[in-house]
Amino acid sequence: MPGSIGRPNWLGSALAALLAVTLLSACSELPGTGPKSNAVHTFATAGLRSDAALPYAVVDVSADTIGFLSQPNVVSFQGAFPDKRPKSLQVAGVGDVLNISIFEAAPGGLFTPATAAGARPGNFVDLPPQAVDQKGSIYVPYAGEIPAAARTLPEIQQAIVARLRNRAIEPQVVVSLNQQHSSVVSVLGDVNTPGVLALNSVGERMLALIARAGGPKFEAIESYVTLQRDGKRVRVLLARIVHDPTENIFIRPNDVIFLSHEAPTFTALGALNQNVFGFNSEIPFDVETLTLAQAIGKAGGLNDQQSDPAEVFVYRYEDRGFLQKMGVDTKKFVYEKIPTIYHVNLRDPSGMLLAAGFQMRTKDVMYVANARVVDYYKLLTLISNTANTVSNTANAVTNVNTAVKTKW
């Protein structure tokens, strides 16, 4: 029976081949969250492929650089708008409505007839409210057109007196603001009552304007304030304005204050205890300023079985001028925002002190690299799993062959 003896071997080989083909074809049917990468690239109608790497700068956090990196935020209202005046002078503008009272030293003058009932020295007349027109002027009887826009109220008074001096009896003029439409500020965004607010005559600071707009809808640590002035925009965390009086600057007419809700966060990746289960987190600061040491603590600390304490990195886009102050050569970079990676070595005894001084910024990415030995563990695990799979497959084929032989 030579044919029957060779038949089980042939059948076993056929079953093994069929098993391999079945496994390969089943790969496309395995569970997944989307298309495979090769399918995305293969079926694209058009695209732009590039192997060019993004240029970046690497900065070691050390005794030489920590003095720069320990500052919580280099952007500030005080630095961007360095006007040291306590307040801006109140001036009239187009659309403002002024009250004008003209006094004369005796009756029988230009505005006070001599036979007026109850005439007395110092009689005066109140003119109808005068609106500053589009040309920036008001009109006063017998004085004519008076330039008013961009002038203070005392300057307008003096201009009217100069026009009436030769016609009225020792004229004196009092000008006051009836309605203010030019010296206004827009407070918008995440405040309870957004709108356009008129500045008072003594000058107002930023927090006072935000309070007049009903206050912020969210906590100060979760609110950013953007000030727009003369085409320039600066964005600062509201909590910093509250805690630093120098940031609570005086507001000028036509400023725009915009509040937005955005809790400062950082992203934690790599060999951290919070990532043991395979997920990465965007973690809120929960405080006004956050150091790298605190950020590592919020992420659960370094994974003792996986991390390399000497390879802790923080990724961010840094201003060119800031890197130049630290001594980084930025000539090879095109843009003003330069991709930068900060490196901290926590194996160094002073590394934790440096991490305690390094200030995190919102949208920073913190990454802790794996120890090199972890790659060997992964390779050994892959080899072991592959060997087990081959062994199991061989055992399965052997069992099939044995079953076939027994049957035949």
Image: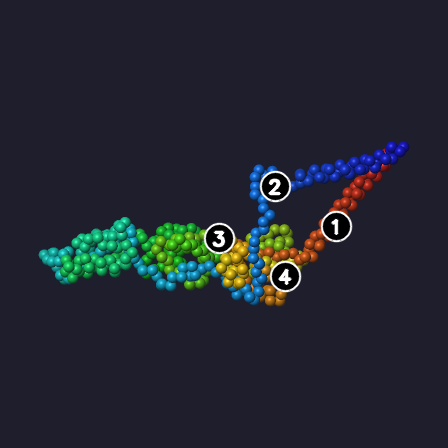
Q: Which residue is mark 4?
A: 310
- Tell me the tag on residue 262: 3
Secondary structure of the residue carrying numbered label 4: strand
Give the mark nearer the N terminus: 3 vs 1: 3
The quadrant in which residue 246 appears is bottom left
Q: Could you say which is closer to the camera, residue 256 or residue 41?
A: 41
Q: Position of residue 229 (x, y in %)?
A: 39, 55
Mark 3 against mark 4, which lies toward the viewer? Answer: 4
Residue type indicated by callout 2: His
Q: Which residue is mark 2?
A: 41
Secondary structure of the residue carrying numbered label 3: loop
Secondary structure of the residue carrying numbered label 1: helix
The quadrant in which residue 295 appears is bottom right
Pointer 2 local density, CA inside 10 Å: few below 14, some 14–19, many at least 20: few
Mark 1 against mark 4, which lies toward the viewer? Answer: 4
Give the mark nearer the N terminus: 1 vs 4: 4
Q: Which residue is mark 1?
A: 384
